[in-house]
């Protein structure tokens, strides 16, 4: 019996000695050794901040292996929680550019429009924006409203065609307020030609619309279709407004690339006079061709 008690006392003393030895080892770590552990931790954790690395090391008694394991367990838990938060979603219903498919003359102002739908399960958060992604150093953005699931919104971008002829392409995407992209890429494709008619078509369409009396909509028909004509030959969601901006897309025809400058009224040609009879005849031909 006495032998067992002596063994237990000896084991307790040994355990206490081990703990004291560990504490003494930790206490003996000088500042340089601790800083070295912080640096090693930062390298393992992809340049983690000094404060965060030191926090996890102190929490694990300056045991590098335990601190690294604790940190990555924390990251896994955070990622799992964020994965449960649904992301916004978007699809491009169709392009609504007036004169779609026509080429545009060089150095000419024109517009492109798309109808977007929230095809997800959550509303778009406040502060979402359309961003040009085909040019790295361009920070132009257009904010879009928060729309509910299955609702639509039309975006209209004001552009000026490049000085060179050819086909030019740009890519846009929607972003959440923190910069996370969602939805498919929105492609802007335009053919620049000296014989282009796109700008003229859009001008005549706007002139024709402004000369027409307001339309009386059939409420029953709107309830059945869910759409209404906005007077520009485009369908818009009943509660949505057209929003326009002036972004600067970076376009390329595969050989050379040139940004579209923002439309500047002082740099544009003087407005043309009201169209004469020949212009009206041309408009009728263009309109019948589009139909």
Image (cartoon, rainbow, N blue to C red):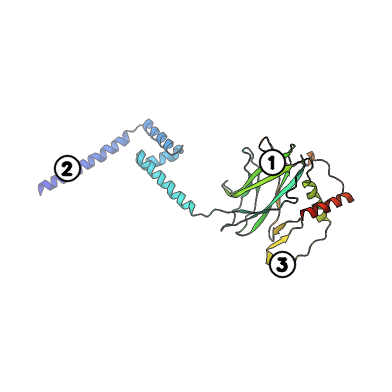
Nearer the N terminus, badge 2 or badge 3?
A: 2
Residue furthest to the right:
277
Residue 18 spot, x, y in % from top left: 24, 39
Between residue 270 and residue 60, name the one nearer to us.
Answer: 270
Residue annotated with mark 2: 10
Q: Which mark is residue 221?
A: 3
Label 1 crowd bin: few (<14), some (14–19), many (20+), radius 10 Å: many
Q: Which mark is residue 237?
A: none
- Whole-percent x, y for residue 284 in the image: 83, 54
148 in relation to 258, above or below: below
Q: What SS does tag 1 mark?
A: strand
The residue pinned by badge 1 equals: 168
Chain-order first, disc 2 or disc 1: 2
Please tell me how crowded label 2 is: few (under 14), some (14-19), or many (20+) other residues with Cα within 10 Å. few
Q: Nearer the viewer, mark 3 or mark 1?
A: 1
Position of 146 with respect to 220 (left or right) is left
Q: Residue at x 71, y 65 (%)?
A: 222
Quadrant of the snapshot with the C terminus: bottom right
**Distance from label 2 to label 1 (Cα)?**
84 Å
Disc on the earlier residue, 3 or 1: 1
Mark 2 and mark 3: Cα distance apart in space: 93 Å
């Amino acid at each position: 019996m006495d032998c067992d008690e002596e063994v237990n006392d000896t084991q307790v003393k040994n355990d206490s000695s081990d703990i004291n030895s560990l504490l003494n080892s930790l206490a003996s770590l000088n500042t340089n050794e601790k800083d070295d552990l912080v640096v090693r931790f930062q390298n393992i954790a992809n340049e983690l901040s000094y404060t965060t690395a030191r926090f996890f090391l102190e929490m694990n008694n300056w045991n590098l292996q335990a601190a690294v394991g604790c940190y990555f367990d924390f990251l896994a838990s955070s990622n799992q929680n964020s994965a449960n938060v649904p992301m916004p979603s978007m699809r491009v219903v169709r392009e609504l550019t007036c004169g779609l498919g026509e080429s545009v003359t060089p150095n000419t102002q024109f517009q492109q429009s798309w109808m977007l739908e929230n095809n997800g399960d959550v509303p778009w958060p406040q502060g979402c924006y359309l961003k040009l992604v085909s040019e790295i150093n361009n920070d132009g953005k257009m904010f879009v409203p928060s729309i509910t699931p299955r609702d639509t919104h039309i975006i209209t971008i004001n552009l000026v065609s490049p000085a060179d002829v050819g086909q030019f392409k740009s890519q846009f995407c929607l972003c959440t307020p923190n910069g996370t992209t969602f939805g498919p890429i929105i492609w802007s494709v335009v053919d620049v030609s000296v014989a282009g008619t796109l700008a003229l078509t859009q001008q005549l369409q706007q002139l024709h619309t402004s000369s027409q009396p307001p339309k009386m909509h059939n409420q029953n028909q709107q309830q059945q279709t869910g759409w209404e004509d906005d007077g520009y030959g485009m369908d818009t969601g009943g509660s949505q407004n057209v929003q326009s901006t002036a972004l600067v897309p970076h376009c390329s025809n595969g050989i050379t690339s040139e940004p579209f400058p923002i439309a500047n009224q002082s740099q544009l040609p003087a407005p043309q006079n009201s169209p004469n009879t020949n212009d009206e005849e041309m408009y009728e031909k263009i309109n019948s061709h589009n139909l």
